[in-house]
Amino acid sequence: MQIKDIETKGLSHVYEVTVPAADMESKLTAKIEEMKGQVKLKGFRPGKVPAAHIRKMFGKSIMGDVIQDTVSETSQKVIADKSLRPAVQPSIELTSDGAKLQEGKDDLSYKLSVELIPDFEPVDPSKLKFTRLTMKADTKDIEERLSTMAEGQKTYKKKAKTAKAKKDDAVLINFIGRIDGEAFDGGAMDGHQLVLGSGSFIPGFEDQLIGSKAGDKLDVTVTFPKEYQAADLAGKEAVFETEVLEVQGAKDAEIDDEFAARFGLADVAALKEAITSQAEGEIEQQSRMKLKRAILDELDKKHTFDLPPNMVKAEFDAIWGQVQSEKEAGQLDEEDAKKTDKQLEKDYRKIAERRVRLGLVLAEIGAKQEIQISNEELQQAMIAEARRYPGQEQQVIEFYQKNPEQLAGLRAPIYEEKVIDLIIEKAKVTDKEVKKDELFAEDEMI
């Protein structure tokens, strides 16, 4: 095998690899000899088909397999011998005459294009300093959470007949809707409880019931939204003949042991303990997220090196595809919606570059610290992923078991978190207690 370095451009290298025709012939002969005992042809005893006959019958097909195997073996040898670290899957371009090669009349020649991971020295985690934002779950926060839960468990009690309905009251009503004087399917109901201000009915319906009282009969005129799910009603005006049976006042649930029992807990003390534990978990998670963001920002600042173009392209293409989907669906955030495609592309390319850079830095730090992912950790990740699909857990697990390359995809987030844990452990981290607004303030997406 001959190897010639024909092009070097930054992190991209192109090699010309040549395997002499005589070597290919030897490989073909060896392959035929290997097959002799397995070939079964009419007129020959099993295992007794002459090599010359096999060559005549299947030579070109076997040579195709030999070519494929040789390209795979020799390309891997080039990478190993030259201690290359490919950033993406190398590409191969056959330069031989295909027909002559299959006939054994030409050398096997191909171009091997390899994009390399850049060489750089990652920062020493022990030299880094960070501030970890944190807070305590105080009594006020716990009480607010309890109040919110009580609001969600409201009860409604009948008011006096003379009481007029106001926002947040409930009204018990009978109604029948008509369009151009004709009743329509689904437009009538008796004894329906409607909370005024809930937005559960057609826009404008609830507002017209404010001020009504038990015994009132009124016509409520509304227009169905143009995007209403029932196409035959969309955009049409309807009149609902409505009778108010009762006006009901809202009352938050009493926070007592009976209330706690609704959530499967023994008493209020146990409920408060559960809420406190949940709040502390949210604080811990948010604190880590903020610290992780600070770590990634610092790693990004401290490393400058050439990025593998194809890695950046792949990352950008994935991001850009999502951006375009959101744009078509009208779901771009307010700031992005104001930008041109050219500006969006510029901004998101920077994000792609940052992600690739950080991925390489984290990988290098992890390699130097000999971070490994155990089979148990991978299994736990697979089970966690399966639990995201209730009722289909077994199918998800079987999918990963049958597709090792997909299972390998679960490694990346585990590896990243382990490297972050290592950096936190080795760096100087100082805790700083802050207010809730600061801890839970949203960061710019990167």
Image (cartoon, helix red, strand yellow):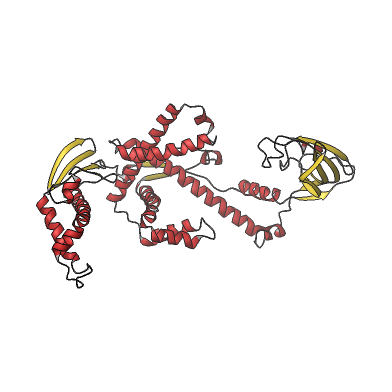
Q: In the figure, is residue 238 to the left or right of 341?
A: right
* Quadrant of the snapshot with the C terminus: top left
Q: In the figure, is residue 202 to the left or right of 71?
A: right
* Residue 297 in view of the camera: no
Q: In the figure, is residue 298 to the left or right of 388?
A: left
Q: Residue furthest front?
A: 43
For image coordinates 16% across by 51% down, the residue present is 103
Q: Is residue 109 above or below residue 326?
A: below
> Looking at the picture, how far across and down is residue 34, in whole percent?
17, 65
> Looking at the picture, how far across and down is residue 356, in whole percent?
35, 40
Q: Residue furthest left?
A: 22
Q: Is residue 273 above or below residue 301?
A: below
Q: How many marks?
A: 0
Q: Nearer the viewer, residue 166 or 297?
A: 166
> Looking at the picture, how far across and down is residue 81, in whole percent?
16, 49
Q: Nearer the viewer, residue 266 or 57?
A: 57
> Looking at the picture, how far across and down is residue 22, in whole percent?
9, 52
The quadrant holding residue 129 is: top left
For image coordinates 35% across by 37% down, the residue present is 313
Q: In the figure, is residue 357 to the left or right of 219?
A: left
Q: Nearer the viewer, residue 359 or 70?
A: 70
* Residue 230 in view of the camera: yes
